[in-house]
Amino acid sequence: MPPWRRRKKARGGDGLKVAGQGVHLLSIAGTGVDATGQPLKGVEIEVTIEGISKTFDTKTKKMGKFNLRVPFKDTQYLANARLDGFRHVNTTVATTQDGNLLVEITMEEDSGPVEGAVPVGEKAEAEPEVTEEQVAAVEAYNEAVRAMKAGDRELAKAKFTEATATDPELEEALSALAAIAYEDKDWETVADATEKLLRLQPDELRTLQMAYVANYMTGNADGLASAARRLAELDPPMVERDMMRNANSSFERGKTDLCRALMEVAVEARPDLAEAQLQLGLCCNDQGDSNCAKGAFSAFLELAPEHAEAEMVRSLLDYLE
């Protein structure tokens, strides 16, 4: 076998192991209206939960609607509503048949006109309205959480998928779907979920790690390079700890596109890493890219002229010239 076709024996496994769990949430939805039933915009809604010191708050939007995601807790939820010119309202939140929470708050005038109230049909600026799709996504997410608690992983996964399809920006559902798919080794689903998550949280280390593994396992060189490049910045030891090992394994299995993607990231992050230059040269040479191979081999010899593989690399360079 010619020296440039030599394969190194892979050392260790094929990637990181990352796991995680989603956050159990409930949706509290409702409306704020005046005594005549007209919707009010800008009502401050503050929810307190027995046993939790933190409060959760939002404001009613156009048509008096609001939707607030809060942690699930099998206890009492209380809502306090405030708006200038109206009396404060304290009320208990009712549980609906699907397990979500619903409240209608009627505000009685205290005195004078109400500044900030938006009558029906008047244009509301700046604050986006909670859409039916967002509410439906939260409901699907909550069904998934209940399914997980009941031990029905198949239903939970289906509902997490439904939630993310309905609202692609529901981070809790995307995180939960990625985690359960990771445990199932459903790499296509992990790759898709983490791609969406990284648009919302580009520096989330756990998400990047799952994206790295999923794209490596599915053979997506572009997705792998993208995750690897950010990981090299956030977790520099990973370049030697994982990327070298995974590139070596990919080269051994003939997956030179994955090997090259990883080693291009590695030499960007660590141009002084002789082994990365060597592995990049071997990958490029296998792909028939002589310019890339010559550049990497020359860099390797400059960094490590006495390396055990130096003579083999000099022979390769002579051949490529």
Image (cartoon, rainbow, N blue to C red):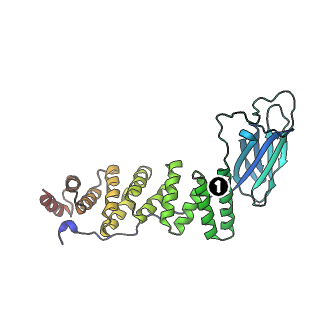
* Residue 121 position (above or below residue 271): above
272 lies left or right of 163: left
For the N terminus, the quadrant is bottom left
Q: Which of the two residues, 76 or 111, is positioned nearer the viewer here? A: 111
Label 1 belongs to which residue?
Answer: 137
Q: Position of residue 271 (x, y in %)?
A: 29, 50
230 lies left or right of 251: right
Residue 21 shows in the view: no
At 59% from the left and 61% from the top, the residue drawn is 161
Q: Position of residue 100 (x, y in %)?
A: 74, 56
**Residue 12, picture quadrant:** bottom left
At 72% from the left and 45% from the top, the residue drawn is 66
Q: Residue furthest top?
A: 112
Q: Which of the two residues, 296 or 121, is positioned nearer the viewer here? A: 121
Residue 152 shows in the view: yes
Q: Position of residue 124 (x, y in %)?
A: 69, 34
Q: Provide the secondary structure element on which disc 1 rests.
A: helix
At 80% from the left and 49% from the top, the residue drawn is 103
For the C terminus, the quadrant is bottom left
Badge 1: how crowded within 10 Å, few (<14), some, or many (20+)? Answer: many
Q: Which of the two residues, 6 or 234, is positioned nearer the viewer here? A: 6
Q: Position of residue 76 (x, y in %)?
A: 81, 55
Q: Residue furthest front?
A: 121
Q: Amino acid at mark 1?
A: Ala
Count of marks overlaid on the render: 1
At 61% from the left and 60% from the top, the residue drawn is 162
